[in-house]
Every structure is written in structure tokens, then in C-alpha cells.
Image (spheres, rainbow, N blue to C red):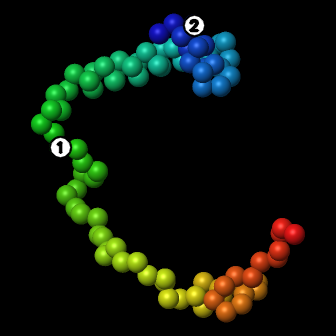
């Protein structure tokens, strides 16, 4: 990767890269792209996608519609409420 490409990437990313760091950044980006190319050579056709290195299932709860049933806990810290509702100042006349 050359300095002009690094300048273009920095411009697109809206970051300021000092001129003296351009060469080292170009070298680092070249190495990163080399690793990506090396990873692309690995055959992953028969590998199942995974979300974790350990086999496990995420716990799930039943999808039930309810109102929560605990308005008193929700309104406990409200500065002002009326019944099971928040009271807010009028903002539109």
C-alpha cells in the first residue's frame, strides 16, 4: 500500500494522519491486508457458523404480552404521578 492510498483512506475516515506516520501506517495496513488474504485461503465451506467456542443455547423465556403489573415500582421514583400514570408539565398551549 502506498502513501497516496493511506492519505485517501485517512481522508475518507476523516482522520488526520501526520506525514511522518504515513510510511509506517502504509506498512501496517499492508501487513493487515496480507493476513486477510491468508485467512481467505482457508477452506471454511463445511464449517458451521458459531457464536461461541462452547456449545450452549441462550436461555429464552416465553413471549407473553402483559402490562408488567408493577406500576407502583415503576412510578416509585417519579416526581409526580396520578394513579398509574406519570404527570408531566404541559408543553403545548
Q: Between residues 39 and 93, which one lies in front from this camera angle?
A: 93
Q: Quadrant of the C terminus?
A: bottom right
Residue contact between numbered discs 2 and 1, judged by CB atoms under 8 Å: no
Which residue is more in the foreground, 38 or 84? 84
Rendering coords of residue 90 (x, y %): 83, 74
Mark 2 vs mark 1, CA separation in Å: 40 Å
Image-quadrant location for residue 62: bottom left
Q: Residue 32 vs residue 81: left or right?
A: left
Residue at position x 39%, y 19% in the image: 33
Residue at the (24%, 48%) spot, across then down: 50
Tell me the residue that label 1 is attached to: 48
Pointer 2 or 1: first along the chain: 2
> Could you say where residue 3 lies in the image, as x and y percent from the top left?
56, 8
Check disc 2 and report its element: helix, strand or loop.
helix
- Crowd band around label 2 with a 10 angstrom C-alpha radius: few (<14), some (14–19), many (20+): few
Residue lying furthest right: 93
Which of the 4 image quadrants contains residue 60?
bottom left
Residue found at the far left of this picture: 46
Report if residue 87 is visible in the image: yes
Q: Nearer the viewer, residue 34 or 87?
A: 87
Q: Tell me if residue 79 comes above or below residue 83 in the rendering.
A: above
- Residue in view at x 22 percent, y 44 percent: 49
Residue, disc 2:
4
Horizontal side of 45 relative to 12 (left or right) equals left
- Please indicate whether residue 18 sits to the left or right of residue 53 in the image: right
Q: Secondary structure at mark 1?
A: loop
Depth check: give the residue in front, 79 or 30. 79
- From this view, report whether residue 2 is shown above or below residue 69: above
Mark 1 Cα within 10 Å, few/some/many (few <14, many 20+)? Answer: few
Determine the residue positioned at 44% across, 81% down.
Answer: 66
Amino acid at each position: 500500500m502506498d502513501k497516496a492510498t493511506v492519505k485517501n483512506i485517512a481522508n475518507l475516515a476523516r482522520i488526520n494522519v501526520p506525514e511522518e506516520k504515513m510510511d509506517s501506517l502504509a506498512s501496517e495496513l499492508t501487513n493487515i491486508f496480507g493476513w486477510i488474504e491468508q485467512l481467505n485461503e482457508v477452506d471454511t465451506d463445511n464449517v458451521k457458523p458459531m457464536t461461541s467456542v462452547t456449545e450452549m443455547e441462550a436461555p429464552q423465556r416465553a413471549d407473553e404480552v402483559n402490562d408488567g403489573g408493577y406500576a407502583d415500582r415503576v412510578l416509585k421514583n417519579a416526581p409526580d404521578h396520578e394513579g398509574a400514570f406519570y404527570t408531566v408539565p404541559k408543553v403545548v398551549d
